[in-house]
Image: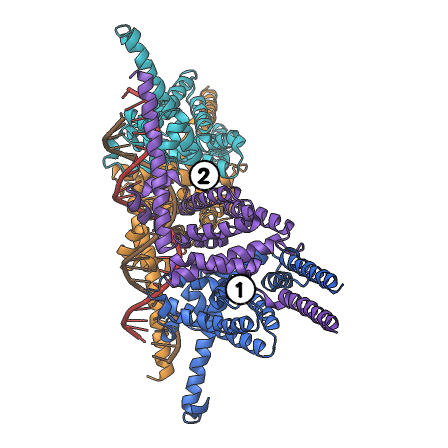
Chain colours: A cyan, B orange, C blue, D purple, E brown, F red
Amino acid sequence: MSNSAAQISQTQTRRQKVEHREEAIIAAASSLFNDKGYRKTTISDIARQSGVADGTVYLYFKNKEDVARAVLADFYDGLTQSAQNGVDALSSPRERIEFFARHHMGEVIGNWRILEIVSTLGHTIDNYEGSDIYALNRAYSTVFIRVAKDAIQQGEFAKDTSPTILRDIFFGSLEYGVRTLMIKRQQNDIENFVQGLMNILFGSGQARNGAVGNQLADRLDQAVSRMEQMLDENET
Amino acid sequence: MSNSAAQISQTQTRRQKVEHREEAIIAAASSLFNDKGYRKTTISDIARQSGVADGTVYLYFKNKEDVARAVLADFYDGLTQSAQNGVDALSSPRERIEFFARHHMGEVIGNWRILEIVSTLGHTIDNYEGSDIYALNRAYSTVFIRVAKDAIQQGEFAKDTSPTILRDIFFGSLEYGVRTLMIKRQQNDIENFVQGLMNILFGSGQARNGAVGNQLADRLDQAVSRMEQMLDENET
Amino acid sequence: MSNSAAQISQTQTRRQKVEHREEAIIAAASSLFNDKGYRKTTISDIARQSGVADGTVYLYFKNKEDVARAVLADFYDGLTQSAQNGVDALSSPRERIEFFARHHMGEVIGNWRILEIVSTLGHTIDNYEGSDIYALNRAYSTVFIRVAKDAIQQGEFAKDTSPTILRDIFFGSLEYGVRTLMIKRQQNDIENFVQGLMNILFGSGQARNGAVGNQLADRLDQAVSRMEQMLDENET
Amino acid sequence: MSNSAAQISQTQTRRQKVEHREEAIIAAASSLFNDKGYRKTTISDIARQSGVADGTVYLYFKNKEDVARAVLADFYDGLTQSAQNGVDALSSPRERIEFFARHHMGEVIGNWRILEIVSTLGHTIDNYEGSDIYALNRAYSTVFIRVAKDAIQQGEFAKDTSPTILRDIFFGSLEYGVRTLMIKRQQNDIENFVQGLMNILFGSGQARNGAVGNQLADRLDQAVSRMEQMLDENET
DNA sequence: AATGAATGAGCTTTCATTCAT
DNA sequence: GATGAATGAAAGCTCATTCAT
């Protein structure tokens, strides 16, 4: 934005047009990938829906895979952005994580098949860790990692909890949750799943005292009682 | 060798051969699907690796999708079987779940992409919930569901915990865990991940200063206070 | 039949078995060709329906085309036989031709697609005129040709009528007639078509006097009247 | 040449090229179908002979059947057109029918096997009567039907003659006639066959001693008898 | 003689990519 | 830059025919 002042007028217009075309193609591809899947979407489909010719797609993207990459970048960018904004607006780690879960499910449930591309493309790529898809994924999950580290710091999780493992648990759970909701066609049950996950991660208010907590507390109470008794007897 | 005996042996040999062929094709397909993915694996690939002609594959399987189904069935059957056996040999819910996690990761980590077929085929199939792939998946996850219900019953999780959500959290976490280990090429770090997951699910030994821990700490503080008071009074 | 006395018992049994197999294959092929057409009928189909193995078909027939030839031979043999018998039982050329038409349509309408094989195979064959299919066809049409020659002889058709052309008209008409009845699904309207054809070939009783006959008769009557008048005048 | 003029010409050139391609494919297919038959002609054959790539065929036609449809449409259109024109240029029903027969044989004799496609495709198509192939066939035969009705009206055929049956007789005869001429390799004997058919349909000049002829002869005999009687009486 | 598993050539169709205009 | 017709490799699948048993 800051260096845009240098390039104006005609150039600007051309860039806008170019960007418009590029965006149009990405938008069309995104919608089509989500509807029909990556494999069943053809370049012709994308071109038609973008209002350009088949060949034009190749002016903006190297090949079909490149289009997919751009779609993913677009999707992840928006996701990362809005996740970060939402997290910034909250203070407690628990609230942040709960928001993140709700936000993630809400965004992903409608764009389910786009994320399939990650696995579709992931294996074509030799050096996945060096790829841009990996970088996008990482940027997004980093937002969570930061929240997770903070939560650990603040005692919400054991000090020795690995943020990476927490991340895998978090996103893995959400992915399966989304999948289940999709299959059962209960896309509105996000809230239910989010609460269930939170209870597992943080323990429900009343729960867990059962198995562990209550036992400990009871034994502590008993110990104190015994000590009190002993002191009493001592007095006499 | 009598004539009928010869026939029997011949028949058996033929049947063995047939079974051998079928198994060889499934094994080849399994390995190829895992290496190249379902879409990029061709019938010719499978035939070549099985040491048969292309057409032979179609003697044993209706079409490519049918091969994939057989591969999945084979994989899930073994997985379900050994998981059930392992679970039966243990008694405490926690031990069972821990075993399940370790077992799942160990089995899946080398056959990662085979499970992708589920989602690949899932979309092709009209009535996924009625399909055999769904049934296989369900049979396996049912083993876990039973363990999970038992664990809830025994107070390891809050009484109102949904076993379905627990299942999604469990398998989702493991899937992401496996993926991470694969990418990082640290396939031997299964143990680390399993412990991490267990700690989140059940709380670590020292754990949870959060919700539960703080309550305990409060009661401890109160008890200590009372003891100090009593000692004070005693002194007088 | 006359030389069968020489070969008896075991040989006979074997031959019967062989003939039975051969007939079974032909019968199965005939029925299948008629239902599904030549191309869509597979050797496996034929083998299954005959109760033999695929390979066995090749013990009796050189290849698929050879099976088709046998089916055609079988069909034409029966057709020729019954046509000849029917014709022999009648005396007037007109009755014979009418019978032939009715018989042909009746036999062919249910075995419509078998005759398609003639054109399907006809072109594969280099020397059609020397082929056995041609011979079969010829044997059948010869029955008609003889009837036709007789009819011409007896004045039912102009003396210079070509029997060959008559044959083409006859069978061509019937083939189209059958086709139309099949398409319109009015397989019971054979009689109607036969009468129509007879009327064209022989002229209906009342008809044709119209255009030609009546005119001639009228002019003849007029001529006679004029002659009578002249004679009358002469007398006086 | 102005820019727009250039564009027009360019567009036209491209369209011409496109039409040329389409025509080239139809021409190639037509010729190949006629030589090898529909089934034995492959898309590759057609593409090679048209000078295009296999895939190009699919730019102009949906599939192989669609190519066949276009070939048939092309063939029938020309046939119908020229038949109608020829018929319109003549007045008497007999002349028209004779022309039609001659014209049909001349056109069909070189493109014999193309018409086979009708029956080849006829079976593939579920609703043949609603298909475009049926419509083409019908459009052509309608030209004849109109002529036939007119002929019946004018007394050339018995008033109760069915035009449909007449049509089947007409085209069926011609088809067999063509077939015979092809087999005998006497493609120049069309005239002979046409005259033969005309004589059957309308009766030859001298013809038909049969039904009609005999009646005439009877009346003639009677007239002569009467004249002889009169002369006898005169002598006295 | 009978079997039927195995073969593999051959077919139709799709679609990412190119390139002359 | 933009076009879109043309390309042709590549895939899934069928089935007549063979041949070891």
Residue B80 at x, y = what percent? 42, 52
Q: Amino acid at mark 2?
A: Asp
Q: Do tag 2 and tag 1 residues touch (Cβ < 8 Å)?
A: no
Q: Residue at x 76, y 63 (%)?
A: C236
Q: Amino acid at mark 1?
A: Phe
> Vertically, is C192 above or below A135?
below
Q: Nearer the viewer, residue B189 or D198?
A: D198
Nearer mark to the viewer, of 2 and 1: 1
Say which chain tag 1 marks: C
Q: Residues within 10 Å of mark 1 (few under 14, many from 20)?
A: many
Q: Nearer the viewer, residue D156 or D65?
A: D156
Element assignment for label 2: helix
> Vertically, is D4 above or below B151?
above
| Number of the label disc, if any, that sits on residue C170 | 1
Residue A174 visible from this viewpoint: no
Q: Residues within 10 Å of mark 2 (few under 14, many from 20)?
A: many
Residue B150 at x, y = what percent? 50, 46
Q: Is residue C114 left or right of residue E17?
A: right
| Number of the label disc, if any, that sits on residue A85 | none
> Vertically, is D146 above or below D224?
above
Residue B104 visible from this viewpoint: yes
Element assignment for label 1: helix
Name the residue carrying label 2: B168
Cα distance in 3D space between marks 2 and 1: 78 Å
Residue B183 at x, y = what percent? 27, 37
Residue B147 at x, y = what percent? 47, 47
Q: Confirm whether circles 2 and 1 share one chain.
A: no
Say which chain tag 2 marks: B
Q: Residue at x 49, y 58 (%)?
A: D195
Q: Is residue B109 left or right of residue A231?
A: left
